[in-house]
Amino acid sequence: MGMERNDEGNRAPVRHVWQRAETEALYGLRFADLMLQAQSVHRKNFDPNRVETASLLSIKTGGCPEDCGYCSQSAHYDTGLKATRLMDRAEVVAIAQSAKDAGATRFCMAAAWRSPKDRDLDQVCERVSAIKGLGMETCVTLGMLTSKQAARLSEAGLDFYNHNVDTSPEFYGKIITTRTLQDRIDTLARVREAGIKVCCGGIIGMGEFLEDRLGMLVLLANLRKHPESVPINLWNEVKGVPVNETAERPDSIALVRLVATARIMMPKSVVRLAAGRHNMTDELQALCFLAGANSIFIGDVLLTTKNPQRDRDVNLLDRLGITSGLA
Ligand code: SAM
Ligand code: DTB
Ligand code: SF4
């Protein structure tokens, strides 16, 4: 069993060699025992009463050449979404400022590209620098990158790059055929090499098995360095794509167990309860926070789908006594 020391030396070892069987055993603990372990790990590494608030903006929507079977923005499917051009710099900066005023500490810009053209990257870099100037953390998600492109984003002051593994190695090919999981892993390595922090997670609720959800966590937790941010997205229903409403959804307890397992496997990573919160009850979200989730997206829309309204989030976090950018 391998064990590596974390960056801070030998105080709290962070493991990077997780086996599937022990991950299943962890996930399958009795609920109270799993939650105690997750909460202990959470409290050792984070303030359990604080949740990070990030805001998302689709700066270039739709018309994407990739065939991700869950996504409203793929040009392979008729989802009724209108493709747009790259959003104006002034408009992006104004939206980022409103997000900051509304309590977001991180601003994440997403573009529906397979990979950015160098000319597009220049424009994204300009927007990153402008948003850094507002005093926000920056994140972008633009598809695959070359090493040179990653270095340029780093020079522009980018803090995080989002690039998800999405699912297990076994299920990946059933959802995406236009790029491989190895392509994703190669881009993640280039992002790391450029000194940019990594935001990497995936989606559940696409008809995958429990083994796939756990396989995804094993994949993430066995990366040489754990992603600093791990978004867990519950598939938000989109009409017209291959993934559809008949896909089996994880039940609430399965979601909480998955969050707790992620927390234990990646103790120092911020785990984000990302897409799908608008369909979750307050009680389910509260359990996810207890299990170690400590980040959310705020704002009424994610990229093209719904997110809870601000009042609902303010009210929920307030009742839980959670400190965030919202209050
Ligand atoms: N095009 C870039 C890429 O795929 O890397 C960035 C944008 S893409 C929309 C970012 C991530 O959002 C995907 O990797 C996927 O995990 C998640 N996502 C996309 N559509 C979703 C949906 N309908 N529900 C939940 N998560 C979704
Ligand atoms: C991530 O893991 N979740 C965000 C962000 N990274 C870019 C995207 C969620 C998208 C949900 C579907 C939509 O709104 O189109
Ligand atoms: Fe394109 Fe990203 Fe959607 Fe895949 S998830 S179709 S790469 S926008």
Image (cartoon, rainbow, N blue to C red):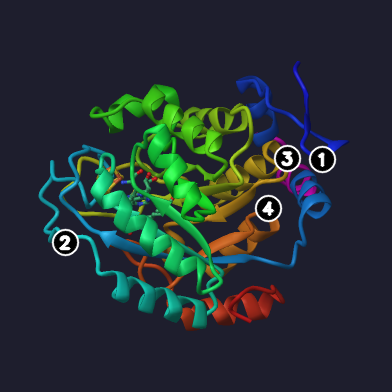
Q: Which numbered disc, 4 or 3, marks the residue that appears first in the sequence?
A: 3
Which of 201/29 is in front?
A: 201
- What residue does disc 4 label? 291
Query: Looking at the image, which residue sits at the far right?
Result: 11
Q: Quick check: 310 above or below 301?
A: below
Would you say residue 24 is visible in this rendering?
yes
Residue carrying label 2: 84
- At a point 29% along the width and 62% down the height, the residue shown is 59
Do the residues bearing badges 3 and 1 touch, measured as CB atoms within 8 Å? no
Region of the chain picked out in magenta, as a range: 28-36
In front: label 1 or label 4: 1
Query: What amino acid type should be assigned to the residue bearing mark 2?
Result: Thr
Rendered image: mark on residue 8: 1
Label 1 – label 4 distance at C-alpha:
24 Å
Which of the two labelled residues, at mark 1 and mark 2, occupies the earlier sequence position? Answer: 1
Q: Is residue 248 magenta?
A: no
Give the residue at x 20% y 40%: 242
Number of dots carrying numbers: 4
Sequence-wise, which precedes: disc 3 or disc 1?
Answer: 1
Residue 40 is situated, as x and y percent measured from the top left of the image, at 82, 49
Q: Quadrant of the C terminus?
A: bottom right
